[in-house]
Amino acid sequence: MAKDPDINADDEQDDATDGLRRELANLRAVLAERRDDMVAAGSRGAQAVVTPVRQNPGVVSSALIMGGIIGFLIGLAVGQSEERSRHWYDRYR
């Protein structure tokens, strides 16, 4: 009895499909592990920031206020550095 070539082709496709499914399952497992590692690292990083803020709220608020004041002064200096009309609509004439 002669072998049917279609049956062998189907078996090979099934083997290839099973192999791809195993590969996909392995990749999902690796990605899940990496995701868990990244979540843990992010949590540790957040904790590293939260602890000093809780221990020194005055210093943190002072630093934020000083940063805002410095940013405002830089904005004023940049805004005054260019000669232009005082009226906003003169820019579009």
Image: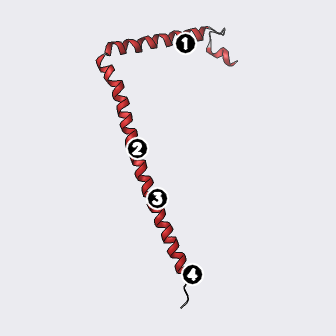
Residue 35's disc number: 2
| Residue matched to label 1 | 75
Cα distance, mark 1 to mark 4? 78 Å
Cα distance, mark 3 to mark 2? 18 Å
The residue sitting at the left extreme is: 55
Structure colour scheme: secondary structure
| Residue matched to label 3 | 23
* Residue 23 against residue 86 in the figure, above or below: below
Residue type, numbered disc 1: Gly
Asked where in the image residue 56 lies, by quadrant, the reply is top left
Residue type, numbered disc 3: Glu
Residue type, numbered disc 4: Pro
Q: Residue at x 31, y 23 (%)?
A: 51
The residue sitting at the right extreme is: 93
Instruction: Provide residue 63's location: percent of width, then percent of height.
Output: 40, 13
Depth order, front residue of 26/86 = 26
Residue 5's disc number: 4
